[in-house]
Amino acid sequence: MVHEVALRMLNSLLSALGKLDGPGKPKLPKFVTDTIFPAIGGSYPINRSYGFSPLGPNNTAITSAPLRPEQGDTSTTFYKEPTDYTFAHEAGHLLDNRGTASKMFADVSSKGAQRNFHTDVGDNPDEYNAEAFAKALMSSRQGFKDSTNVEKRFPGTIDVIRWLQTRPPFITQKGQ
């Protein structure tokens, strides 16, 4: 009986490790490596924790920026198995934290505030920006053909789409 329990625990551990690319590092889908990383200017630290999020059991991930730039880059820790959408949302937080697209994100939050749109976490502009970024990246999968509808449902997303179209890998799609 004890051996069976130990064997099940070992199998669970090995199964979990099979989903990792090293200690705490998830294997990244092609959408992340071929789409998100080029769009935001490169990779960033991504970790997978099998513990509980300090923000509660329903929280999927935390993207956190260091207090000082010399302490390293912004990083994301996933507490649940991430979807492509979750990766895109957290990449929006990362880009917003880095400040490399501050005008675009200012335009996005302004449109959300003007239209009195709210996300599932209230009217937090950081969450609104990350949602718009994720929706724009998801639209890229259809070559941005649904951009008008996406903008109607989530104002400001078109600003992200326009910004993305100036970045790899989308810059080659512009004008198609």
Image (cartoon, rainbow, N blue to C red):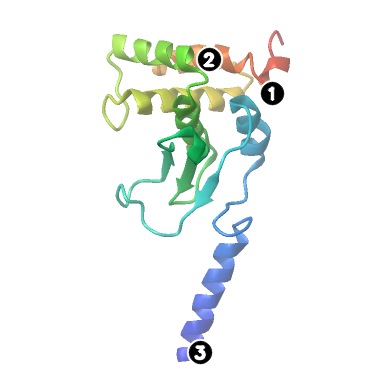
Q: Nearer the viewer, residue 8 or 21?
A: 21
Residue at far bottom of view: 1
Q: Is residue 91 above or below residue 104?
A: below
Mark 1 or mark 2: whose residue is earlier in sequence: 2
Q: Nearer the viewer, residue 58 or 176?
A: 58
Mark 2 falls on what kind of element?
A: helix
Q: Quadrant location of residue 125?
A: top left
Mark 3 falls on what kind of element?
A: helix
Residue occupying the point 59% across, 18% down: 164
Amino acid under disc 3: His
Question: Total number of numbered labels?
Answer: 3
Amino acid under disc 1: Pro
Residue at the disc numbered 2 = 147
Residue at the disc numbered 1 = 169
In the rendered image, residue 81, in percent from the top left (x then y), is placed at 49, 51
Amino acid under disc 2: Ser
